[in-house]
Image (cartoon, rainbow, N blue to C red):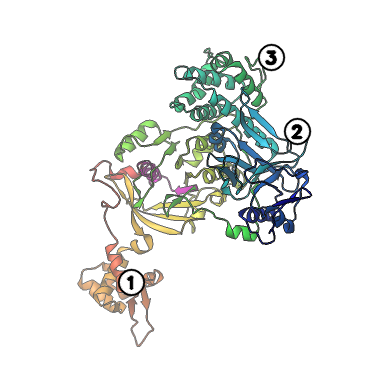
């Protein structure tokens, strides 16, 4: 290998096809500008490398040697920016604070340490350091002299000998610079506090002092709770949940006029230099004496949701993109995303949701489907704790399940519907399932016939559900009358079902436990399940496909009569055999038998033959279909319930 006018030239560059060259071509195809350097080197040594703009034909000359490769940052051609997480606390905090992106890389010693974004050009590098000068995290773009910087990317080799690899090799998310900086400042403050979190014995006081300071700065209770819990978890505090409770308790004490500790105590525990940096990064205004002891105002926007402009793919890139398979909470029935369960009042929707929460928490069965275990939240906005407790006893809940309940949502003047509260809860707790029962109680006063309003209030929930791998189920009421399509069932605007990923429609015949659950959605196969309610266990169970299960008494009698006559008969013959066997009296008339046969034709269970003479013959499409119809009326069994738990609720319970 030799140098020619500052370029690195491989002696057989035209023949070489190194991993670096293959990668360079891929980066060039995406519009990124690359910079070569020697293997194991941290940065380029070529003179004038910030101005290097390689063409595709020049790539073999620079990368045939198989050295390292970097991407230029802050240039208008690609608008790339890199967030470099330098310490373990920053790597752990990044998923909690940074906007999602599909371009992340690292090395074995520091996996997922580089998060890539597209940011409007001209972004200048910003560094966040500990009080001892240790680099915590930096947003890399242009240097302070406004020249491009670079970051090594796979398959480069770090000076330690470790190879860089892609943890997510999609496209970088496009983010506004101000939003990215706001997220990074909060992340840096969290990392710094985690590194200086006090030893056991004073942590609760520290959390209280931090909560008081942030509340005085104008932060909301959910923001404070989320931030303190994240700091404690990153610090390895085993009682992070207990610390987070100060986010609610401390503001409540302040509202009641009860004295609480604040920044003076906080500074004593973590150090005044630490508090000064946190105050600067969170834009907390210090007192007149220059020390951040009394916060008088705040300009930070807290942990507001980050809106990221999605990337754009070419057709080939989209065809080749390695997207993961859809995530299921209940395989085949309930995927990740937003689901709406619609049903008339008193048909058993809440019983079904309680049963679903129990199945997820226990890792049991729901409608005869095995459910992977996970955490669940259930906001029963129409119930009170005593009723929930009774119903849990009726369903024989076991202790220790990771399910939490609420009968109210946390609402503020700026968040009247609790959307920010739920969003942050999902970010924080990462539940597999979150149920809100009902939509009307969640959005009081919302005009549900206004498609614009309905779309606006539901879209944030749908987005966070998909982003965090959670299934959000919102219980809703059906409109009056009978809708021809389950999508038209929910009360109000069809904007509800337009936003939802899945729609469930629960229909039940009054005075019976028989029902159907109709399911449709983007990633589910449309189906209609026949259900029955067991009053012993206060649970729903599946009888199977409603098309083969739900036959009327008359249809069942005709199918059995046809089977007796070897699967082929005329209406007259069927009427006679039904009369001889004391079948339904209405079917002793051949004209009524003909009507039932027509229903079975529509169900594709019977076929009409061409008329020959005075009689018309009908035959079963398959004898097996008749057998299945006869066997369909099954009873509850061990397939959906682990043990026989005995009688526990009345027949009327379903309507309560």
Label 2 vs label 3, nearer the camera: 2
Identify the magenta region.
337-362
Q: Residue furthest bottom?
A: 613
Image quadrant for the C terminus?
top left
Is residue 58 left or right of 643 when viewed as pictured? Answer: right
- At a point 35% along the width and 88% down the height, the residue shown is 613
> Which secondary structure lies at badge 1?
helix
Mark 2 residue element:
loop
**Residues tagged 1 and 3 counted as in contact (Cβ below 8 A):** no
Q: Is 182 situated left or right of 469 in this image?
A: right
Q: Residue, x 26% and y 51% (percent of image)? A: 638
**Dot 3 lies on which element?**
loop
Reading the chain from its start, which is encountered first: label 2 or label 3? 2
Residue picked out by circle 2: 144
Category of crowding for the residue at label 3, using alpha-carbon neighbours closer than 10 angstroms: few (below 14), some (14–19), many (at least 20): few
- Which label lies toward us, 1 or 3? 3
Question: Residue 63's x, y, as percent?
Answer: 68, 53
Residue 591 % position (x, y):
34, 74
- Please indicate whether residue 143 sits to the left or right of residue 221 in the image: right
Q: Is residue 449 magenta-colored?
A: no
Instruction: Specify which label sits upstream in the sequence, 1 or 3.
Output: 3
Q: Nearer the viewer, residue 271 or 451?
A: 271
Name the residue carrying label 1: 592
Q: Position of residue 324 (x, y in %)?
A: 51, 53
Dot 1 alpha-carbon crowd within 10 angstroms: few under 14, some 14 to 19, many 20 or more: some
Determine which of the numbered discs, if any, sits on residue 75 in the image: none
Percent x, y for residue 614? 34, 86
Measured Cα–Cα span from mark 1 to mark 2 = 89 Å
Q: Which residue is mark 3?
A: 290
Mark 1 or 2, nearer chain start: 2
């Amino acid at each position: 290998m030799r140098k020619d006018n500052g370029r690195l030239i491989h002696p057989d560059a035209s023949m070489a096809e190194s991993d670096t060259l293959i990668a360079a071509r891929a980066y060039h195809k995406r519009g990124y500008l690359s910079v070569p350097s020697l293997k194991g080197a941290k940065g380029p040594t070529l003179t004038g490398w910030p101005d290097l703009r390689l063409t595709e034909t020049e790539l073999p000359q620079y990368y045939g040697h198989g050295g390292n490769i970097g991407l230029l940052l802050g240039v208008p051609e690609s608008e790339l920016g890199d967030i470099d997480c330098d310490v373990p606390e920053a790597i752990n905090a990044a998923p909690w604070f940074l906007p999602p992106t599909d371009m992340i890389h690292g090395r074995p010693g520091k996996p997922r340490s580089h998060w890539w974004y597209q940011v409007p050009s001209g972004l200048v590098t910003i560094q966040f350091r500990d009080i001892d000068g240790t680099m915590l995290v930096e947003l890399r773009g242009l240097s302070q002299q406004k020249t491009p910087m670079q970051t090594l990317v796979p398959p480069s080799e770090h000076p330690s000998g470790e190879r860089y690899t892609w943890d997510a090799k999609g496209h970088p998310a496009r983010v506004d610079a101000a939003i990215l900086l706001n997220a990074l400042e909060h992340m840096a403050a969290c990392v710094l506090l985690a590194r200086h979190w006090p030893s056991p014995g004073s942590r609760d006081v520290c959390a209280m002092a931090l909560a008081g300071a942030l509340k005085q700065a104008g932060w909301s209770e959910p923001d404070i709770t989320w931030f303190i819990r994240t700091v404690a978890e990153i610090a390895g505090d085993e009682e992070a949940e207990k610390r987070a409770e100060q986010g609610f308790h401390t503001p409540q004490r302040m509202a009641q006029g009860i004295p609480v500790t604040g920044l003076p105590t906080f500074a004593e525990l973590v150090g005044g230099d630490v508090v000064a940096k946190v105050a600067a990064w969170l834009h907390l205004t210090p007192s007149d004496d220059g020390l951040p002891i009394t916060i008088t105002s705040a300009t930070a926007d807290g942990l507001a949701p980050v809106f990221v402009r999605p990337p754009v793919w070419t057709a080939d890139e989209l065809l080749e993109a390695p997207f993961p398979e859809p995530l299921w909470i209940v395989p085949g029935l309930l995927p990740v995303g937003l689901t709406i369960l619609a049903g008339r009042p008193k048909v058993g929707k809440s019983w079904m949701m309680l049963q679903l929460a129990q199945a997820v928490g226990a890792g049991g069965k729901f409608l005869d489907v095995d459910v992977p275990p996970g955490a669940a939240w259930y906001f029963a906005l129409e119930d009170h704790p005593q009723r929930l407790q009774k119903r849990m006893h009726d369903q024989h809940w076991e202790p220790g399940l990771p399910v939490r309940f609420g009968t109210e949502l946390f609402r503020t003047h700026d968040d009247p519907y609790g959307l920010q509260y739920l969003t942050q809860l999902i970010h924080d707790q990462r539940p597999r399932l979150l149920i809100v029962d009902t939509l009307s109680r969640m959005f009081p006063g919302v005009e549900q016939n206004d498609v614009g309003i309905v779309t606006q209030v539901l879209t944030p929930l749908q987005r966070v559900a998909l982003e965090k791998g959670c299934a959000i189920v919102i219980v809703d009421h059906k409109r009056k009358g009978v809708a021809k399509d389950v999508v038209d069932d929910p009360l109000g605007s069809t904007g509800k079902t337009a936003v939802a990923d899945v729609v469930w429609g629960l229909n039940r015949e009054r005075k019976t436990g028989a029902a159907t659950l109709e399911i449709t959605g983007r990633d589910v196969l449309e189906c209609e399940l026949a259900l029955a309610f067991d009053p012993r266990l206060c649970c729903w169970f599946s009888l199977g496909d409603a098309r083969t299960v739900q036959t009327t008494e008359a249809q069942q009698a005709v199918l059995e009569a046809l089977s007796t006559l070897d699967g082929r008969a005329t209406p007259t013959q069927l009427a006679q055999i039904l009369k001889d066997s004391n079948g339904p009296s209405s079917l002793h008339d051949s004209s009524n038998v003909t009507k039932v046969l027509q229903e079975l034709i529509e169900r594709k269970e019977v076929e009409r033959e061409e008329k020959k003479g005075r009689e018309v013959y009908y035959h079963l499409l398959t004898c097996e279909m008749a057998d299945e119809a006869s066997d369909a009326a099954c009873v509850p069994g061990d397939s959906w319930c682990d043990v026989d738990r005995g009688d526990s609720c009345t027949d009327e319970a379903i309507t309560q």
